[in-house]
Image (tube, rainbow, N blue to C red):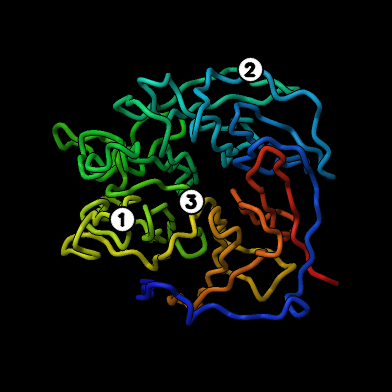
Amino acid sequence: MLKPIRTVLLGCLLAVVPLSALGYRIEVLSEGLEHPWSLAFLPDGRMLVTERVGRLRILEADGRIDPEPVAGLPEIFVTGQAGLLEVALDPDYHDNRWIYLSYSYGDAEANNTRLARARLVDGELQDLQVLFTARPLKAGAAHYGGRMTFLADKTLILTLGDGFDWREEAQNPTNHLGKIVRLSRDGSVPSDNPLVGQAGNAPEIYSLGHRNVQGIFFDAENGRLYSHEHGPRGGDELNLIKPGNNYGWPLATFGVDYTGARISPYSSLPGLSDPLLHWTPSVAPAGLTLYRGELFPQWQGDLFVATLAEGSVRRIRIHGDRLAGEDILFEELGERIRDVRSGPDGALYLLTDSEEGRLLRVLPSE
């Protein structure tokens, strides 16, 4: 069991390292991506990148962007935080060619997160299947979650948000707001989900009490499912997800409302799962990976968190069953970082969030 860090600013844990000693260099692979959100690596060396505005792009191994976006996407609701979110490859992609997409579905008065899958054939999506739509549909254009990962049994984990104005619903097990859900890859509900068979409760729920989960990663080597979520003003969290657990939002939080009003007098309550660590002030965590490459042996087994507000990547050092502190990386870019990925070549990949977003590759300095 990982030991949580108890701190507010975490300043005592941040390593101050001279730029000359960082040991990395950053290459620009692609430019001109419009609010890129997610990155996936194809077996042939190409990459898939989602643009929140509703485009799926194919990038060559050298970063060149195919001039035409992928055709055949489903209808996507695009405004504010709504749009095309995550892309992920099926664990058996070599055999079945399925890719999964999360996106905002509906209109301004009735929308939520949807999951679909399709086969990518010659730059077009074929055999599109809608697998899951989060309920209820609600008004507004904020807090969709949308990140995905696969567990050891190849079931799919999808993160969701609380819809911003419906935060109390994160504690309501009859709906999907503020939840993490687990699905079979065809969209059916696994029979061993924690709420299956409980009358009235949503059987897809894997955990509850979340605000807006935009980072999820399954560490297959250690059997750990990590997530992070946005707090309001303060209280961003890194969590270790266990099936059926309640992570507290909004009953317990380290954050306050954007008005400065107190949301809850509690940062911890009996029966609720505490975060491994939290960030106050907010860093706005937006992507999550765990490094298992060979180019940076000093990073082996550490978590990396992309941040929007701080414009950095937080390296969370893990030693055995302990969190061993943090480093702040890549602030020199001066950009919002939406996603971070550990690539099959051992490099670290970054997506920057802007109308002229970039795909960057981090390599050893030598």
- Foreground residue, 366 or 330? 330
Secondary structure beneath dot 2 equals loop
Horizontal and vertical percent for residue 196?
A: 23, 38
Question: Relative to residue 257, is residue 349 drawn left or right?
Answer: right
Marks 2,3: beta carbons within 8 A: no
Please identify the residue farthest to the front as the structure is shown: 259
Instruction: Give the residue at mark 2.
Output: 72
CA gap, disc 2 and disc 3: 27 Å
Mark closer to the chain start, 1 or 3: 3
Q: Which mark is residue 252?
A: none
Badge 1 marks a residue whose secondary structure is loop
Q: Earlier in the sequence, mark 2 or mark 1?
A: 2
Residue at position x 57%, y 62% in the image: 304
Give the residue pinned by disc 1: 260
Of tags 2 and 1, the one toward the viewer is 1
Secondary structure of residue under mark 3: strand
- The percent coordinates of residue 91 (x first, y second) are 57, 42
Q: Which disc is residue 215 wearing?
A: 3
Residue 16 sits in which quadrant? bottom right
